[in-house]
Image (tube, rainbow, N blue to C red):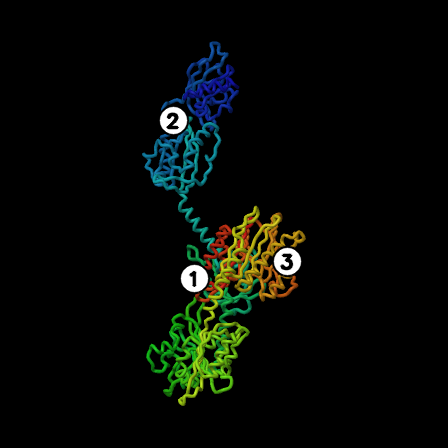
């Protein structure tokens, strides 16, 4: 074998076809040129009698033995190639030793030096004739990738002219990485003969002259001409096909994912396709519908005549639209708005029917309920004494109850079509607009008890209290107004007389009362609205009573004595005294009393002026106390996030004023992580001190050896019993959520004492889950059993603990931030660390609240499982 390898290495150095034959005529070695000439590989002929195997039977002067050929130094032969073709060659035999025992060197040359070139040219002409007028591209290359033929179709496809391409490597038509590997592929094929894409068509990517790429289908064939191998490639542009496939896929996805139910039947009515929405609507899986007739869905509620008209329309090639009531698989009926369209082929013949259904069951029910409601409304309107009406968006009456005749002296027919402004008394347009609540109409919002001034048909003045509300359609468009007017003409006349007399004193923001100085105990005979607001007592409750009604346990006796002296001596008096409102809450009253004399100079009344200065006094008295409470509160809270190998926790507390009642804590104890969030009622030093006691007691309970295995529910029960007496004495209570995380099992145990349930967001979850367990607030009942919950957490899971200062934050419009917005913010910022997540949620709450002040404290803790 070493000799054969050496022979081959020497022979491959020559371009001429050479073979070494044993003295017996058997082939020992041949070079690549001889392999190309004969079509055989060396291994296929080694050991075979070369002449008897390859020489054609009809060759002239040819004997199948080496001795016969050795007698003639040069001779012409016709040999059979592997592909069964024959070729004329000239053969020379040279002995390798004097006696011929060392074998012979055989030189093989095709007869006619230009035959290879002529054959290639002839083949190129033939290929150009065949492919010249075709859109597909034809490219012929040699074994080394050099382009020998570049058709017109290839010029159009790749953007190169033939003269630019010929002689260049074919890899210029390929983008990277295909171009980078092409030369090595050809080399490997020449060396091993292993085919990869030759003879197999496949989709590839081509590269145009301008650098753009495009999809194409490439077929490669291999041809031999005069012992030389060439490769022929046919390329077909797939750009339009790919675009069509993409459009078809998009259309298919649109139909399959459409919210409209789609069904396709053949012309005989047999179902051939339904989308997922159709299967969902009818309750039948697709395989139970395919091949069936749509009549299986028919209900007895739809008239048969309607189905007849339907088929008459679509068989005539006309689209049908209508509403039908069908039956689901479970027997339930549903209403559908349906469109059926005939589908035609190129000849205009109907081949299929396309049906699209939209479920309108709820719309039908709503419409029927609305009709019933309107009927009931009109019946009640006819029986009611008040004037009921409806107006279009521009304020013109579309309906009026019969009571309008009693109110304005006009029949409903006279009112309908008129604007509400047409019925007003002849006043200026500005005054009329003010009295009809223009802001309500402009802002399209309800109005209540608005006083309107109408002109009766007989020219008298009519006053009504009008209440109305806008009615919107599903798109949010204003459809109409609906309301009622109550006749208050008599009452209005009386009130106007009183209003003239009392307008001045009733408009002032300070409290004013008139006392009867001649009656026992000097009772009130008049109080203005401001005094009712200050004291919390209604006008009726204040009238007939004296200042004794406002006294309380801390009312200064000296101040009362000064008031009594002023009454006895009929003099003026100014004092600052602590009084009590109706709800028992004290307030500071800056009181001024002045006597009123009659024409004879006799004191008949006293006038008292009351100014509530509680806020001013409270600010002064409580400023120092609140500062102390604030320091106490802040000292209780963790001053940094907690990071353990299994969990990261951060928290924050933002008081609404100087000091808050919210409290949170987290700590690690014997490898277990404890988290607590609570809300102590009240905002004072007392509440802050209770918070201190809660924190100390809680931490002490968690460190007891006997409670090492106690769950959160048992701990809350013990905590409630320990704190009950103090909380009761302080008239306070506590809401609290307590949980414990066991790292070894990743188990979270928790219990709740009336606190907002925390939110759990799984690492791969799409929604937030509330963690809740039944339990009464701390400090109400001494013995309470709390329900305990537990669940297993995973890495990446997050917990959000919060107080109601988050969810009950309000904007200027009075809307609450609410649990839904909190859950959305939690999910939106889920990728942040606990500390940054808290900052992001607080920013969302502040942005929602806008300029509205914070009404409650905010506490929040975020824990993330590591």
Instruction: Judge the density around disc 1: few (<14), some (14-19), many (≥20) Cα neighbours within 10 Å.
Output: few
Q: Disc 2 to disc 3, how far (Cα)?
A: 98 Å
Residue 283 in view in this figure: no
**Pick the front one: 66 or 766:** 766
Asked whether disc 2 touches disc 3, contact meaning CB atoms under 8 Å apart, the reply is no
Q: Which residue is mark 2?
A: 116
The secondary structure type at the circle numbered 3 is helix
Instruction: Judge the density around disc 3: few (<14), some (14-19), many (≥20) Cα neighbours within 10 Å.
Output: many
**Pick the front one: 542 or 143:** 542
Please tell me whether mark 2 or mark 1 is closer to you in this view: 1
Q: Position of residue 864 (x, y in %)?
A: 54, 51
Picture residue at 51% right of the left edge, 86% below the top: 520
Q: Disc 1 to disc 3, how far (Cα)?
A: 39 Å
**Pick the front one: 450 or 154:** 450
Residue 573 in view in this figure: yes
Q: Which residue is mark 3?
A: 713
Asked which quadrant contains residue 847, the reply is bottom left
Which label sits on residue 215?
Answer: none
- In the rendered structure, which disc, 1 or 3, sits on the residue that comes first in sequence? 3
Query: Is 409 drawn above or below residue 75 in the view shown?
Result: below
Asked which quadrant contains residue 330, the reply is bottom right
Query: Is 350 drawn above or below residue 301 in the view shown?
Result: above
The secondary structure type at the circle numbered 2 is helix
Asked whether disc 1 touches disc 3, contact meaning CB atoms under 8 Å apart, the reply is no
């Amino acid at each position: 074998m070493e000799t054969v390898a050496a022979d081959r290495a020497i022979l491959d150095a020559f371009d001429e076809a050479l073979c070494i034959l044993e003295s017996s005529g058997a082939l020992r070695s041949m070079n690549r040129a001889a392999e190309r000439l004969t079509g055989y590989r060396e291994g296929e002929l080694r050991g075979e009698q070369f002449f008897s195997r390859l020489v054609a039977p009809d060759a002239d002067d040819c004997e199948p033995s080496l001795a016969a050929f050795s007698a003639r130094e040069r001779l012409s032969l016709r040999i059979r190639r592997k592909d069964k073709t024959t070729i004329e060659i000239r053969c020379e035999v040279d002995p390798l030793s004097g006696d011929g025992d060392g074998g012979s060197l055989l030189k093989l040359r095709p007869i006619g030096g230009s035959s290879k070139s002529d054959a290639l040219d002839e083949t190129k002409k033939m290929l150009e004739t065949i492919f010249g007028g075709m859109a597909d591209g034809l490219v012929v290359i040699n074994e080394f990738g050099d382009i020998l033929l570049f058709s017109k179709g290839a010029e159009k496809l790749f953007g190169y002219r033939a003269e630019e391409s010929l002689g260049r490597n074919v890899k210029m038509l390929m983008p990277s990485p295909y171009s980078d590997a092409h030369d090595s592929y050809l080399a490997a094929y020449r060396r091993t003969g292993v085919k990869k894409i030759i003879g197999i068509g496949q989709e590839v990517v081509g590269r145009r002259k301008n650098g753009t790429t495009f999809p194409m289908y490439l077929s490669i064939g291999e041809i031999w001409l005069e012992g030389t191998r060439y490769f022929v490639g046919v390329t077909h542009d797939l750009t339009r096909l790919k675009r069509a496939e993409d459009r078809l896929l998009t259309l298919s996805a649109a139909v399959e994912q459409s919210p409209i139910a789609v069904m396709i039947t053949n012309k005989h009515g047999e179902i051939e396709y339904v989308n997922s929405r159709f299967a969902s609507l009818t309750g039948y899986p697709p395989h139970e519908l395919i091949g069936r007739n749509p009549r299986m869905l028919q209900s007895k509620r739809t008239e048969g005549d309607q189905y007849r008209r339907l088929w008459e329309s679509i068989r005539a090639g006309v689209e049908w639209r209508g509403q039908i009531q069908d039956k689901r698989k479970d027997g339930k009926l549903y209403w559908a708005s349906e469109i059926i369209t005939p589908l035609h082929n190129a000849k205009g013949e109907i081949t299929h029917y396309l049906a699209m259904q939209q479920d309108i069951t709820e719309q039908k029910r709503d419409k029927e309920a609305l009709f019933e409601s309107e009927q009931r409304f009109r019946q009640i309107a006819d029986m009611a004494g008040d004037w009921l009406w409806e107006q279009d968006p521009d304020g013109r009456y579309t309906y009026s109850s019969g009571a309008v005749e009693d109110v304005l002296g006009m029949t409903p027919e006279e009112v309908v079509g008129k604007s509400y402004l047409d019925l007003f008394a002849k006043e200026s347009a500005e005054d009329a607009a003010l009295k009809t609540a223009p802001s309500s109409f402009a802002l399209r919002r309800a109005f209540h008890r608005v006083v309107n001034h109408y002109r009766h048909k007989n020219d008298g003045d009519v006053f009504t209290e009008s209440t109305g509300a806008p009615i919107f359609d599903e798109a949010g468009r204003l459809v109409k107004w609906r309301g009622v007017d109550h006749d208050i003409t008599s009452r209005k006349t009386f009130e106007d007389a009183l209003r003239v007399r009392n307008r001045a004193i009733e408009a002032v923001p300070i409290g004013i009362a008139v006392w009867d100085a001649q009656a026992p105990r000097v009772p009130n005979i008049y109080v203005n609205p401001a005094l009712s607001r200050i004291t919390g007592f209604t006008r009726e409750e204040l009238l007939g009573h004296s200042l004794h009604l406002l006294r309380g346990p801390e009312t200064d006796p000296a101040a009362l004595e000064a008031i009594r002296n002023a009454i006895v001596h009929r003099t003026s008096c100014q004092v600052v005294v602590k009084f009590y409102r109706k709800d028992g809450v004290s307030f500071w009253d800056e009181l001024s009393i002045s006597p009123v004399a009659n024409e004879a100079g006799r004191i008949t009344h006293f006038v008292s002026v009351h100014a509530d200065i509680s806020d001013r006094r409270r600010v002064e008295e409580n400023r120092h106390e609140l500062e102390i409470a604030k320091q106490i509160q802040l000292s209780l809270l963790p001053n940094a996030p907690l990071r353990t190998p299994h969990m990261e926790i951060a928290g924050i507390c933002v008081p609404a004023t100087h000091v808050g009642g919210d409290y949170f804590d987290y700590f690690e104890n014997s490898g277990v992580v404890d988290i607590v969030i609570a809300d102590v009622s009240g905002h004072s030093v007392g509440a802050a001190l209770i918070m201190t006691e809660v924190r100390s007691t809680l931490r002490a309970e968690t460190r007891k050896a006997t409670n090492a295995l106690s769950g959160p529910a048992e701990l809350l029960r013990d905590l409630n019993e320990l704190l009950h007496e103090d909380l009761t004495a302080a008239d306070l209570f506590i809401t609290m959520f307590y949980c414990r995380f066991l790292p070894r099992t990743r188990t979270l145990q928790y219990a709740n004492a009336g606190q907002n349930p925390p939110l759990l967001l799984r690492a791969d979850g799409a929604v937030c889950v509330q963690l809740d367990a039944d339990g009464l607030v701390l400090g109400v009942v001494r013995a309470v059993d709390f329900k305990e919950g537990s669940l297993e957490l995973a890495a990446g899971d997050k917990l959000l603990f919060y107080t109601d200062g988050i969810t009950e934050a309000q904007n200027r419009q009075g809307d609450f931030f609410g649990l839904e917005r909190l859950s959305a913010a939690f999910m939106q910022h889920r990728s942040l660390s606990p500390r940054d997540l808290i900052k992001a949620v607080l920013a969302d709450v502040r942005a929602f609240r806008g300029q509205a002040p914070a009404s409650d404290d905010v506490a929040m803790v975020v824990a993330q499982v590591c």
